[in-house]
Amino acid sequence: MAGAHGVVRDASVSAEPLSVDRALATVREPGVGGIALFVGVVRDHDHGAGVTSLDYTAHPTAEASLRACAEQTAAAYDVDTVAVSHRTGHLEVGDLAVVVAVGAAHRQAALEACRHLIDTVKQQVPIWKEQALTDGSTEWVGLPGGTGA
């Protein structure tokens, strides 16, 4: 960690579908030589159980918390730009749940910051998911701390 000058270009929580292309475009600028990207996708299983869909619920403070995580990461790493978006509402298997993009002059800083940001989001942002399982039951994941994305 170098304590640098990163700018948060996006930190959003939305029911609208997420776009990898939008995230990449958001963090691109002339000084960026490497972009690290994390894309969380709804999978068809969790801890051995089949999953058919899930619903994300966000606390009213979720977007502010997401922005705080992004700002802390941008300040702690030698990166230029940061963007993070998280979905809410009903998602099907294959839908994008979270997208993190970090632009830096060099790949190592971008990769480290990207990993730090998604780990911090999962721990600190008050977004929870209710999974619909193939046996017809549902279960909540991520209560009470952060997301289960």
Image (cartoon, rainbow, N blue to C red):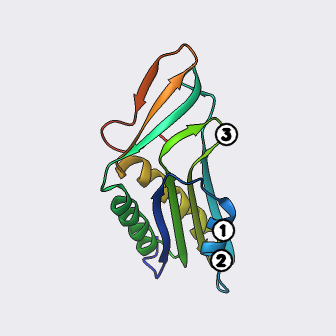
Give the amino acid at mark 1: Leu
- For residue 114, which quarter of the picture? bottom right
Pick the residue in front: 7 or 138: 138
Q: What secondary structure is marked by label 3? A: loop
Pick the residue in front: 50 or 79: 50
- Taking 64 as reference, is 54 above or below it? above
Res. 117 mark: none
Give the amino acid at mark 3: Gly
Q: Position of residue 111 (x, y in %)?
A: 60, 62
Q: Which residue is mark 3?
A: 94
Give how far apart the Cα atoms at labels 2 and 1 are: 6 Å
Q: Which residue is mark 2?
A: 28
Tag 2 and tag 1, C-beta contact below 8 Å: yes
Give the foreground label among 3 and 1. 3
Pick the residue in front: 147 or 18: 18
Q: Position of residue 40 (x, y in %)?
A: 59, 47
Q: What secondary structure is marked by label 1? A: helix
Q: Position of residue 87 (x, y in %)?
A: 51, 50
Q: Which residue is mark 1?
A: 24
Q: Position of residue 113 (x, y in %)?
A: 52, 64
Residue at (40, 70) in percent of width and height: 71
Pick the residue in front: 106 or 19: 19
Residue at (41, 75) in percent of width and height: 75
Residue at (55, 79) in percent of width and height: 80
Alpha-carbon neighbours of circle 1 within 10 Å: few (<14), some, or many (≥20)?
A: some
Residue at (37, 52) in percent of width and height: 125
Dot placed on the residue nearer the N-terminal end, 3 or 1: 1
